[in-house]
Image (cartoon, coloured by chain):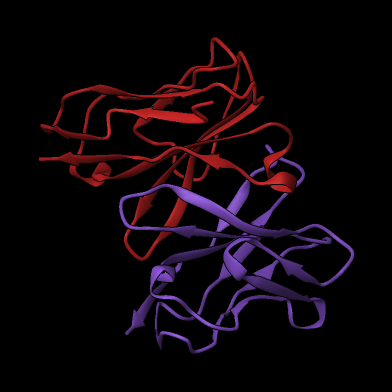
Chain colours: A purple, B red
Amino acid sequence: AQSVTQPDIHITVSEGASLELRCNYSYGATPYLFWYVQSPGQGLQLLLKYFSGDTLVQGIKGFEAEFKRSQSSFNLRKPSVHWSDAAEYFCAVGSTGGGNKLTFGTGTQLKVEL
Amino acid sequence: NAGVTQTPKFRILKIGQSMTLQCTQDMNHNYMYWYRQDPGMGLKLIYYSVGAGITDKGEVPNGYNVSRSTTEDFPLRLELAAPSQTSVYFCASSLRTGGQYGYTFGSGTRLTVV
């Protein structure tokens, strides 16, 4: 069965600092990988997704993620964090069978210090 | 274009009461999903549907029921509310296979059972 691990429950960074959120997945085939962001009281918004091809994926709001098959990782990065990036971030892996659904990690709560 | 609309946004139920969480999408998406979100647990799949008239159980279906009579609507029914069903519920949809293309989420329903 597919699974996603986000090892960091909370992360605090200073505004303007770089950010990396970790995500490790378990999936038998080539994975479909996603990062979502959830602002307080809101639904989840898609930041970026990886299907195949270039392992460095660009997303919205200046985020990027790198797929590393050898490490089963799909870490999210941003060069310079803004206060408005404070939110919860979810990594997810998608299956193409059994309802074609996403399996989510437990999330990483990002706090940005001014 | 409203996307995925969930009603109500908030609800307090007494133990043993029943209610229906409504979900409507106007994007002509075939795939629809119900998740619940609990603190520190990420999102857990309750039920999903791959088209009108077709539904299947997810990871945590006990205590819930669904129906899909139209492409647009995917209501979630709680028959005998229990405190364990206190959670935030998200409906999502996908045009094609959600595992490959990701979801569009509604803004959620926060349910408290007392």
Task: Name the residue at 48% across, 22% down.
Answer: B74
User: Residue B39, how many percent across, how many down?
Assistant: 32, 61
Task: Name the residue at 44% across, 70% down.
Answer: A85
Q: Does residue A40 show up?
A: yes
For the N terminus of chain B, which image quadrant?
A: top right
Task: Name the residue at 61% across, 63% down.
Answer: A3
Asked whether, in this view, residue B87 is left or right of residue A23, the answer is left
User: Residue A71, how many percent across, how many down?
Assistant: 75, 83
Image height check: is A68 above or below A54?
below
Image quadrant of residue A9?
Answer: bottom left
Which one is in front, B19 or A89? A89
Instruction: Looking at this view, name the residue that lies furthest to the top.
Output: B69
Task: Name the residue at 72% across, 49% down.
Answer: A95
Image height check: is B74 above or below B95?
above
Image quadrant of residue A79?
Answer: bottom right
Which one is in front, B61 or A37? A37
Image quadrant of residue B5?
Answer: top left
